[in-house]
Amino acid sequence: MLVLSPVRTWPDTVPPPNRTLGWAVLDWVSRYLLQPDGPDAGKPFRFTPEQVRILLRWYEVDADGAFVRRQGTIRRLKGWGKDPFLAAICAVEFVGPCRFGGWDGDGMPLVVPHSAPWVQVAAVSKDQTRNTFRLFPAMFSDRLIAEYGIDLGKEIIYSRAGGVLEAVTSSPRSLEGGRATFVLMNETHHWIAANGGHEMAMTIAGNVGKSRGGGARTMEITNAPLPGEDSVAEQSWHAWSKVAEGKARDSGVYYDSVESPPIDMGDPEQLRAGIIAARGDSVWLDVEWIISTIYSGLMPRSRSQRMFLNQLVTAEDQLIDPADWDACAVEAELLPGDEVVLGFDGGRTDDATALVAMRVRDRLLVPLGIWEAPDGPEGDGWVIDRSAVDGSVRNAFATYRVSAMFADVALWESYIDAWSEDYRDRLLIKASPHSAVGRDMRGGLQELTAANERLMSAIEHHVLPHLGQDFPLGRTLRRHVLNARRRPNRFGLSFGKPTRESGRKVDGYAASLLADLARHRLVESGKTRRERSGEVFFF
């Protein structure tokens, strides 16, 4: 049987944290909660090993007893067991041991119930909240109900101590001002602007932020979101991506996802291996039934990928397929003295600034710097550090043998004039008739369109090598590339941002396009450098 390694945001090799409330949570659940359905219905609730690892991470505390992670997302394929898993966490937050209560004699955390729990199961429709709320009567054991004085209701549950567990589907305005201690945000891939999902998410974030001591938290459960729909789940993915890249401050974000690697869905063996990779420990899923559902043709391929492989798949107008981009990743190294061309696309405040190198002999694409405003308040009034960018450009010329540089002139005219003056004698071709470096992307639409189609073709045929996601700039470049959208014009297919005012940056792709165009023009000119000599030959 074919075995595939799943794509994970949390590798299994990461050991469990030393300071965690999770062990007490696991013990309490085993004594008070029951399996709600399936062949083990009515037996003590048991987490899978995968879920145990998530719990231990989620309930990790720092040296002061504060939670390390304040907002989380669990993204899994359909049928993984997201609702029962989070229903168990809701029960713990409702009446179980879930807060730091000091240290014992061995320096381990003591765990106590919340003094005034207010737990919400939030969704944009009642049907979504029912998926979780209907589980509680079957999960709550007689012992739990008796000891904690549980009063079961269809949409609100009370405890003797005054705890509240409620379903929330009302408007954001009616939610304003609540002081929930834990909020389960259910199926956030359905939370979009049109159904009030964006406003609801912001209201919940504001309510949780008012908690005393910062102990209130939120957890999303979601399938892979549809790219380009701008759901809350997609926003959470982009926010986490920036944290992982080092482009945003880590404010306690926890993102846990397991997905299938790229596969040929037309090959049943590969499809079976992909489903097994994505399902993790949810061995109750019927793999053969899922395969038959996918092959039945009842749903589009992209939806099958999102639902059953947990893959983030291409939006309808997305320029580059993520699988094609990832397939171009190679193990390589850009060495000092290598002959390269440079591509540069600059911004000032809202837009990002990107500098990439492309090695002439093999087309290896390497990002040298991508600067963009951080998310949140830190981004207010942010302006690019032009001296840092200038330093990176000059360092590239000092480190590599730069044969050409194409830089978009918009907003950077004075710097481009300086680079052109300082380095024109070293460059083998000029970027434009008027500048050795400056290439205005607002003109020459036909040439840029042809260059875009050439770059797309290279990626689709997996002949544009890059260094992958093993370092932060590689992850940032990937995000910029996958943000690019198809923009047809009279000459062919160009690219652009999702919308004119979109915060999804594409400047890394624009810089890559300019670098590839520079290399193409250099090769077509017949000018090259002899390896290791620095001599110029004309053919």
Image (cartoon, grey):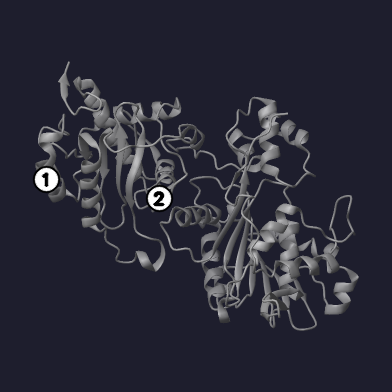
Q: CA distance from mark 1 to mark 2?
A: 29 Å
Asked whether residue 298 is in view, the answer is no
Count of labels in the image: 2
Of helix, strand and loop, which one carries label 2? loop
* Disc 1: CA contacts within 10 A as few (<14), some (14-19) or many (>=20): some
Question: In x, y percent, where is residue 459?
Answer: 42, 30
| Residue 366 vs residue 191, the one in the foreground | 366
Nearest to N terminus: mark 1 or mark 2: 1
Q: Decide if residue 516 is on the left or right side of residue 106.
A: left
| Residue 326 vs residue 481, the one in the foreground | 326
Question: In x, y percent, where is residue 239?
Answer: 48, 57
Which quadrant holds residue 95?
A: bottom right
Question: In x, y percent, where is residue 339?
Answer: 26, 32
Asked whether residue 370 is in view, the answer is yes
| Residue 232 vs residue 253, the one in the foreground | 253
| Residue 6 vs residue 511, the one in the foreground | 6
Mark identifier at residue 504: 2
- Check disc 1 and report the residue beneath it: 417
Q: Decide if residue 419 is on the left or right side of residue 252.
A: left
Residue at 59% across / 37% down in the picture? 261
Q: Decide if residue 300 is on the left or right side of residue 436.
A: right
